[in-house]
Amino acid sequence: MDIVVKNFTQKYGVSIAVDDISFRVKTGEVLGFLGPNGAGKTTTMKAITTFFTPTEGDITVGNLSVVDQADEVKKHIGYLPENNPLYQEMAIIDYLTFVAELQGVDKSMIKERILEMVNVCGLEGEKHKRIAELSKGYKQRVGLAQALIHDPDVLILDEPTAGLDPNQIVEIRELIKQIGKEKTVILSSHILAEVEATCDRMLIINKGKIVADGSPKDLKKQAQGKEIVKVTIEGATADEVFTELQGIENIDLVDFIDKNNMSFEIQSKNGKSSRKSIFNLCVEKSWVLTEMTPIETKLEDIFRELTMN
Amino acid sequence: MKKIWTISKRELQSFFDSLMAYVMIILFLGFSGFFTWLFGSDVFFVQQASLQSFFGIAYWTLFFFIPALTMRQFAEENRSGTIELLLTKPISDWQLVLGKFFSTLILIIIALVLTIPYYISVANLGPIDHGAVWSGYLGLIFMSAAYISIGIFTSSISNNQIVGYLLALFIGIFFQIIFGILSGSVGGFLGKLLDYLSVSTHFESISRGVIDSKDIIFFLSIIFLGLVLTEVNIRKRRLT
């Protein structure tokens, strides 16, 4: 089921939380929603899940509008809200039964679905405990289990790995990836590595506007206009190497990283590569080239560049 | 209908799991039993096989207990954020409100059913007006339903249970006694209006065995109004 967000605006009183954004998520796609706190991620998710009615614009989930056909939309969505609210006093099985009944899962199927969810989410050993007795990681799994209980076509997860330990994070990510193969998934996070690891596509939102849209790879490529390499050369004095390097035509900027170690950061001119020339220079002068590493732009840098101003 | 029952079932379970239900039932039976059998104008003092004293005491006990039961219902969901879970499930706002309403009503009915031994005992003591007893129970149920709907409404206003409780008592006390008192000192149309708005007027007439459509309409209007306002409150949240 495709999710189409069209000119969606959400206002709280006079302040604008989300400002006229549009995007589309296709079936089988895992979309990562990134942005600093208060950028409008949660607001957008709440609108998709019909918790808020959009102030302006429309959102459709598989051609059903959240404004006019909210009840139909809800049937197709599994939602894990921010902070994972749960009825602490309930036992896991009772809670999952309650959610399954609300979601209109067929009575004969409820038991089977719950067993399956307990398996998929790794709740086997805990299933008779009350939710309040569980650790944070297990609570998160219960939250996921309740979102998945009716086998929804669309999954909306608001910070699914917040507050988990590294092992649990890896497990939950694997789970999301596995689920994401057949379903449409939107997840929000401000952990960049997480989005890189789980998502096919990412959307960076800042102050209510989309500032970047694409696969993590594409975004990196886009941001990386210039080739930057780290080079370490032996066999001459630093100053000599420095002047010679600056003489190469394609090189825009040479900078010392560590003068004693003879390592330099070399930035080429736009769209040009200077790696070959550097190598040739070393051969010509019989210097020893001990290191040449391309410096990649990290997602963190892109994120900072797009959201800091 | 099934969804309403799903909500009610969970609420009832939560009443019993949190011991709230047991505490409420025991206190209710204790208070009403004490004043029906042992103290004040009890059955032996009145020297009449009648449950009037029981209805009188139940009228006040329920008035204080009901807000304590309803105060949690929406306030707690708002506070913990579980309201978001419920409202993004395929149920309507009305199903949610009615589910909560019926869960409390069912608990009150359970408490009232447990007082039937009082009725049987009194009936064994002398000739009793069976019709008056049943209509008395009916009156208690209607009055409870009215206060439940007020309590649910005040609970939906904020995410603080105490605010819900006090506000429910504040609104309730007008219907419970203030309108009645005022109607005595104000004459004319206003006096009649205040008299009509007083729960005690309607409760007394029902519990005497006179079931008038006027009384039923009064209670149903309060119930309806309370529930509509709750629903509006929930819907308002969505429109931000």
Image: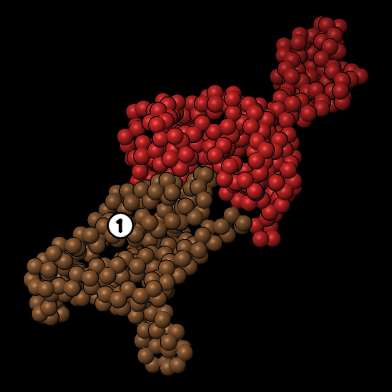
Chain colours: A red, B brown
Q: What crowding class fits label 1: few (fewer than 14 Cα within 10 Å), some (14-19), or many (20 or more)?
A: some
Image location of residue A119, percent across then percent down: 41, 25
Q: In this picture, is B211 found above or below A135?
A: below
Name the residue rendered at 79%, 13% in the picture: A236
- Circle 1 — which element? helix
Name the residue rendered at 26%, 71% in the picture: B136
* Left or right of A235, for residue A162: left
* Left or right of A80, for residue A59: right
* Left or right of A299, for residue B103: left
Question: Front-most of B202 and A79?
Answer: B202
Residue tagged 1: B107
Image location of residue A212, percent across then percent down: 74, 36
How many marks the image carries: the answer is 1
Name the residue rendered at 37%, 65% in the picture: B145
**Residue A195 appears in which quarter of the rendering?**
top right
Name the residue rendered at 61%, 57% in the picture: B240
Q: Is residue A166 visible?
A: no
Question: Front-most of B129 and B143?
Answer: B129
Image location of residue B223, percent across then percent down: 43, 66
Q: What amino acid is labelled 1 in the image?
A: Leu
Q: Is residue B101 visible?
A: yes
Q: In this picture, is A172 found above or below B91?
A: above
Label 1 chain ID:
B
**Residue A130 appears in which quarter of the rendering?**
top left
* Left or right of A182, for residue A97: left
Say which quadrant the N terminus of chain A sits in: top right
Q: In this picture, is A26 found above or below B180?
A: above
Question: Front-most of B195 and B208?
Answer: B208
